[in-house]
């Protein structure tokens, strides 16, 4: 379906051409003077220079061609040469009926479907999820859904950190705690136990303890380092413990991501990329791309257009070990082999930007990805506390994600129970949904690259630009529709009214913008644009609701028109929150 802007532009193009002007000038924008008109075209000013004519004369001629057109309630030329337009009410109502009846509200991608890998989540196995991982999960899930809605094949990969020093630390801590385990008996030849020697709560306690110990005990730190190397070179005992760590940890991570309503198509990790490393590095050496520098193998990435100096990418350390960049490059080798993606989107803390610049450039230079592969680093900012510093617990520690979620659920629960007649059980269940929405919307409504302040009071408020406000609007519409049905109303043969009041017209106009907004959010990988839009839709709906008696309307046709309008409003809002991976309760 064409957007309203495209339809207007098509008419204006014809009119410009009919008057002998290049149709290039028929550019339409949303009016920046909503008090005067809804859409405008400033093309007559630009055409004036080319045709050496007064702009208002051109505008007058164009407007004369369109003055009777059904699309417009009014189209006028205003000095010095603006063309101001107000849409016809009948036209608008028909447009919305068509939108309501069309898949995706008429959105259709103009490009060919792509295979896109979204690398997000990035949790580290055996370490609890903390708020730093929240942003990646929340933004990544939304970017994934937006890319899918646009018609692409999208593969989300959690890309676990599962191959680092934390493994050696856990192995050695386990040795100190339970030396009797067969993994630590060098003469053991049987099969290692199938059951893990720890539970998730033990594992969560083991890692921080080991990490603290390694900072004080140099010998322990050395042992952990060696255990890590042993694991990385395939030692059976270390591998067996590693498998247990992964089993226990993945199960717990899945539960946590499920609670966030975030899911992944692939549960791969850095470890999966390791087998690809030797050949990949060797090829870079054979091709003359990687060269030796102070014992390490490096690849230059500097380009002429760079304004600052960028360090070469180290692909192999002097002791032969692989690095973070090597793992990411080898992961690309694996992904190319398995999926041949057209595009990659990495949703990672923006402090890792240099790392990804290095990885992307080496990947292209080495021919690991296609020369035209679309590689995006979607770097996000930090979630800060009210003091402007990275968010911490009251005692100054790193906040665990579970605790953060519990805090916001509680804030919402207190609001719900305060003034509503709900059983405690329903209030608890509702707070979970609304609390998560508060948290996600608080995050997604900011441009991803910006830092933001986590403000539980503001995020959980039912008023203002918040998740709960948006949900409250949807719940309000649901309740009107339910009452309408209870009173014998039907949803058959609904069609929009030519707008009566200003509130109704405004809501109708806002709804027509869905496709434009979605297209911009997709092109810019910007969930915050969806947030801006649903805030506008919600405000417009609430304005309309405020000055319209919907259910008390005695003219049945009019009432049905209202029902059609608010049904579409609800559908658009629900579609948009789904793109943000936010859910809505039935009551709140
Ligand atoms: N595990 C990393 C961290 O916690 C994030 C991984 C990001 N993704 C990647 N492909 N490097 O910082």
Image: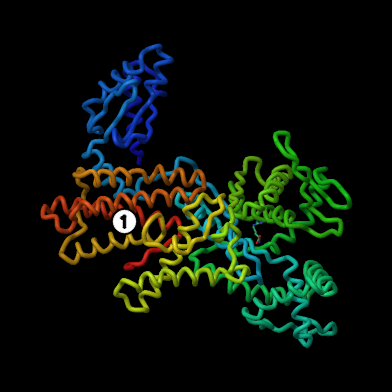
The answer to whether 566 is drawn above or below residue 204 in the figure is above
Identify which residue is drawn at 83% across, 47% down: 285
Q: Percent x, y for residue 294?
A: 88, 50
Q: Quadrant of ligand 1?
A: bottom right
Res. 136 in view: no
Residue 161: name its quadrant: bottom right
Which of the 4 image quarters holds residue 367? Answer: top right
* Residue identified by numbered label 1: 570
Q: Residue furthest right?
A: 295
Q: Is residue 206 left or right of residue 219?
A: left
Examine the rendered structure and indicate whether residue 407 appears above or below residue 97.
Answer: below
Q: Nearer the viewer, residue 296 or 74?
A: 74
Residue displayed at 24% across by 38% down? 91
| Side of 537 relative to 204 (left or right) | left
Q: Is residue 544 above or below residue 245?
A: above
Task: Indicate the quadrant containing the C terminus: top left, top right, bottom left or bottom right.
Answer: bottom left
Frontmost residue, 379 versus 502: 502
Depth order, front residue of 204/466 = 466
SS of the residue at dot 1?
helix
How many neighbours does mark 1 have within 10 angstroms: few (below 14), some (14-19), or many (20 or more)?
A: many
Q: Residue lying farthest top?
A: 52
Percent of width and height locating residue 49: 43, 15
- Mark yes or no: residue 402 visible: yes
In this image, 560 relative to 540: left or right?
Answer: left
Q: Residue furthest front?
A: 387
Tell me which corner region of the image, top left, top right, bottom left or bottom right, holds residue 94: top left
Q: Residue at x 81, y 69 (%)?
A: 225
């Amino acid at each position: 379906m064409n957007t309203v802007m495209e339809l207007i532009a098509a008419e204006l193009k014809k009119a410009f051409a009919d008057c002998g002007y290049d149709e290039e000038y028929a550019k339409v924008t949303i009016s920046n003077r909503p008090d005067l008109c809804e859409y405008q075209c400033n093309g007559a000013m630009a055409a004036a220079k080319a045709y050496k004519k007064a702009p208002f004369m051109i505008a007058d001629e164009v407007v004369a061609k369109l003055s009777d057109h059904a699309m417009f309630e009014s189209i006028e030329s205003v000095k010095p040469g603006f063309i101001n337009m107000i849409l016809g009410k009948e036209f608008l109502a028909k447009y919305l009926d068509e939108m309501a009846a069309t898949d995706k509200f008429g959105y259709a991608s103009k490009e060919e479907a792509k295979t896109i890998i979204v690398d997000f989540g990035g949790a580290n196995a055996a370490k609890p999820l903390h708020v730093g991982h929240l942003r990646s999960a929340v933004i990544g899930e939304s970017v994934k859904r937006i890319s899918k809605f646009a018609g692409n094949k999208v593969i989300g990969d959690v890309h676990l950190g599962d191959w680092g020093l934390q493994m050696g630390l856990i192995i050695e801590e386990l040795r100190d705690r339970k030396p009797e385990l067969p993994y630590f008996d060098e003469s053991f030849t049987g099969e290692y136990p199938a059951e893990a020697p720890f539970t998730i709560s033990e594992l969560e306690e083991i890692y921080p303890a080991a990490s603290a110990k390694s900072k004080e005990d140099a010998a322990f730190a050395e042992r952990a380092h060696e255990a890590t190397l042993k694991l990385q070179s395939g030692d059976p005992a270390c591998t067996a413990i590693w498998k247990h760590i992964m089993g226990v940890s993945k199960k717990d991570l899945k539960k946590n991501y499920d609670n966030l309503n975030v899911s992944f198509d692939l549960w791969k990790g850095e470890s999966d990329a390791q087998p690809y490393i030797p050949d990949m590095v060797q090829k870079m050496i054979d091709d003359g791309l990687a060269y030796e520098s102070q014992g390490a193998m490096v690849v230059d990435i500097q380009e002429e257009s760079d304004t600052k100096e960028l360090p070469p990418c180290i692909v192999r350390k002097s002791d032969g070990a692989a690095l973070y960049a090597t793992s990411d490059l080898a992961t690309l080798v694996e992904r190319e082999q398995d999926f041949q993606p057209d595009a990659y989107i990495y949703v990672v803390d923006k402090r890792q930007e240099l790392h990804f610049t290095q990885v992307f450039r080496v990947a292209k230079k080495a021919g690991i990805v296609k020369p035209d592969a679309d590689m995006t680093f979607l770097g996000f900012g930090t979630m800060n506390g009210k003091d402007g510093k990275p968010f911490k617990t009251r005692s100054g520690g790193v906040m665990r994600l579970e605790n953060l979620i519990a805090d916001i659920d509680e804030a919402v629960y207190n609001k719900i129970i305060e003034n509503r007649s709900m059983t405690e059980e329903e209030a608890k269940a509702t707070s979970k949904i609304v609390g998560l929405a508060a948290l996600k919307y608080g995050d997604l409504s900011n441009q991803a690259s910006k830092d933001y302040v986590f403000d539980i009071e503001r995020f959980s408020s039912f008023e203002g630009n918040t998740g709960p406000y948006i949900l409250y609007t949807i719940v309000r519409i649901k309740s009107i529709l339910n009452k309408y049905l209870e009173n014998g109303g039907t949803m058959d043969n609904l069609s929009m009214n030519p707008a009566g009041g200003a509130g109704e017209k405004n809501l109708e106009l806002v709804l027509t913008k869905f496709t434009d907004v979605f297209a911009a959010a997709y092109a810019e990988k910007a969930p915050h644009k969806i947030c801006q839009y649903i805030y506008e839709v919600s405000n417009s709906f609430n304005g309309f609701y405020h000055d319209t008696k919907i259910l008390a309307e005695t003219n049945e046709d009019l009432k049905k028109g209202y029902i059609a309008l608010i049904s579409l409003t609800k559908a658009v809002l629900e579609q948009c929150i789904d793109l943000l991976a936010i859910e809505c309760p039935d009551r709140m």
